[in-house]
Image (cartoon, grey):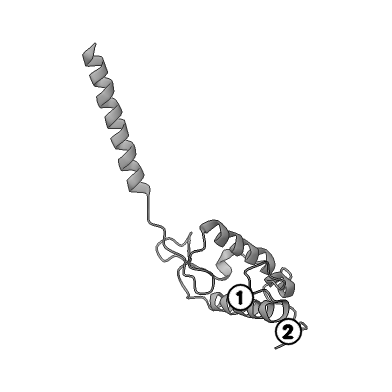
Amino acid sequence: MFQLHKRKLYAGIGLLAILIIGASATTQDKPKPNLKVLPKNIDHEELSKIMKGFNVSLGVKCNHCHVPSKTDPKKLDFQSDEKPEKEVARSMMKMTAKINKKYFKQNDGGASTLTCLTCHNGKAHPDSKIVIPE
């Protein structure tokens, strides 16, 4: 009877060891986002929400600003600043924040009055007829 319990114990320990080794082998440190305008302490969910907002507002996919990974072309390299569109997006974010703060008093972190959608309206390049005061 003791032998049966001993076998079960060893089998359980063995399975647990396999699970731990398997989990540690597949767990990778995710690279931190390359944030220059957004808060450094933003959580993944909020960052994804903002990026999806860009997708909708500009009618583009993630590869509009992000380059393919050099190690796996099926994935994107979110760290890279290789595409100029990424710097344009940063400039536009700064611009809208400045306009909201100056004209709509949005300096408390509340919802912006002016957003990407305001001018882009689902297009990668907004109408040139839009005039933004300086």
Quadrant housing residue 130: bottom right
- Give the left or right position of residue 56, taking residue 32 as reference: right
Q: Position of residue 22 (x, y in %)?
A: 33, 42
Secondary structure beneath label 2: loop
- Most extreme residue toward the top is 1
Q: Position of residue 13 (x, y in %)?
A: 27, 30
Residue name at image x 23 percent, y 20 percent:
6
Residue name at image x 38 percent, y 56 percent:
29
Give the quarter of the figure containing the N terminus.
top left
Task: Using the image as rendered, state which of residue 90 and residue 107 is in the foreground.
Answer: 107
Q: Which comes before the other along the chain, label 1 or label 2?
A: 1
Quadrant housing residue 4: top left
* Mark 1: few/some/many CA within 10 Å (<14, 14-19, 20+): some
- Give the left or right position of residue 133, taking residue 84 as reference: right
Residue type at mark 1 is: Met
Is 89 drawn above or below residue 15 in the view shown?
Answer: below
- Most extreme residue toward the left is 3
Q: Which residue is mark 2?
A: 132
Q: Which residue is mark 1?
A: 93
Secondary structure beneath label 1: helix
